[in-house]
Amino acid sequence: MGDGDVDTAKGRLKKAAGDLTGDDDLRREGKVDEASGAVKDKVGDAADKVKDALGRDDRGD
């Protein structure tokens, strides 16, 4: 589970807690965390594609 997945899960939990408690600030924080997770996933995917294109793995081989 990468950083993006963790942020996405954390965001979902915050949104659900905000919904249950009626806390709009917590709900908004959850949305931000989810968006942050999505961005981290996209950046990670792009980095992996660049590494693949260059014929390198995570060790820099």
Image (cartoon, grey):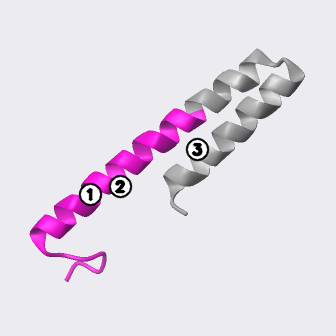
Q: Which residues are magenta?
A: 33-61
In magenta segment, residue 16: no
Residue 15 lies in quadrant: top right
- Circles 2 and 1, Cβ within 8 Å, touching? The answer is yes
Q: Amino acid at mark 2?
A: Gly
Provide the residue designation for mark 2. Answer: 44
Q: Nearer the viewer, mark 3 or mark 1?
A: 3
Cα separation, mark 3 vs mark 2, equals 14 Å
Looking at this view, name the residue that lies furthest to the left.
54
Mark 3 vs 1, N-terminal side: 3
Query: Gap between marks 3 and 1, in whole Å?
Result: 19 Å
x, y percentage for residue 59? 29, 80
> Residue 47 location in percent, x, y?
26, 57
Badge 3 element: helix
Residue 2 position, x and y percent, is 51, 60
In the shown orientation, is residue 9 left or right of residue 23? left
Q: Quadrant of the C terminus?
A: bottom left
